[in-house]
Image: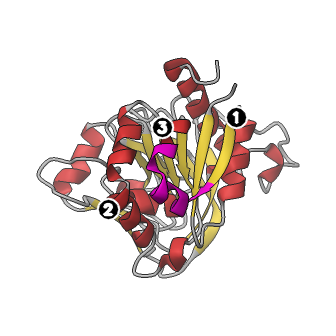
Amino acid sequence: MKPRTLILRTAGTNCDLETAHAFELSGAVSERVHINRILREPQCLDDFQLLAIPGGFSYGDDIAAGKILANQLMHHLSDALRAFVDSGRPVIGICNGFQVLIKTDLLPGPMAGVAGQSATLTNNDIGRFVDRWVRLLPQAGRCIWTVNVKGSDDRDVIELPIAHGEGKFVPATSAIRAELWERRQVALVYAKADGTPAAGAFPDNPNGSVDDIAGISDASGLVFGLMPHPERFVDPTQHPAWTRKPDRPAHGLQIFQNAVVYVRETLGAGV
């Protein structure tokens, strides 16, 4: 018995196989499930302990990145998804999946004084798609996905690739911006080579995200969204400089391993 992960896919999803592989390397069983099946059978979520919304361009990012899939989830599966999280089961949204979660009520979750969407992911400041590796600093907070994620040196900087055109994280108000930090919902920030935050400067902050935010969780720490792609660094040889440091840890793999360990220890899944 292993924990079971549902990899949600739809038209335009293109990172589902890599995401499934990452969970399987981490000790889970993965099943790629089309949104139409879940719309017909919301109860099938009960068969899984983990949920992932992978990267890609769901529905071609028509209207806005992730908006159509987010509307499907909000209007048809809101209760089922809320019950999934309330039962203690983790959810991850990667790149387009993060955009989807932001456009639902799952991330960042209920915020003081705001009804509905309280943040967005909008066009990169440089006005174009960016595909490169970035440095990140995990933050001490609520997120179960990033707890104890370790970098390659004593600065605990990790590296992951990005590939997006709409990755700039912007809270709706300054009060929400402050609340995200106060409630320790900021999980990852973009960093410089010396391990300090990117301070908004390109290319260390590749999109202009407010406070260099690259990933956040909800208040429970179970729902996690990030723009970088952890599923693309689950083996040391995937790093562009792997031959110079072949023992470099696969930083992305640690994120998936954290969630699998969590459901084993907390839910007894796979034991």
Three-letter residue code for mark 2: His
Disc 1 secondary structure class:
loop
Residue 164 among magenta residues: no
Report the magenta residues as a range: 33-44
Q: Which of marks 2 and 1 is nearer the N terminus?
A: 1
Mark drawn on residue 127: none
Vertical order, 138 against 118 (above or below): above
- Residue named by callout 1: 26
Task: Give the Cα distance between marks 3 and 2.
Answer: 21 Å
Vertical order, 202 against 241 (above or below): below
Q: Earlier in the sequence, mark 1 or mark 3?
A: 1
Three-letter residue code for mark 1: Ser
Residue at the spot x=32%, y=62% of the render? Answer: 75
Q: Where is residue 10 in the image (x, y as percent from the top left)?
A: 57, 66
Could you tell whether 190 is left or right of 186 in the image? right
Task: Give the Cα distance between marks 2 and 1.
Answer: 32 Å
- Residue named by callout 3: 90
Vertical order, 87 against 161 (above or below): above
Quadrant of the rendered structure where residue 122 is? bottom left
Quadrant location of the N terminus in the rendered image: top right
Task: Give the Cα distance between marks 1 and 3.
Answer: 15 Å
- Mark 1 surroundings: few (<14), some (14-19) or many (≥20) residues within 10 A: many
Disc 2 secondary structure class:
helix
- Residue named by callout 2: 75
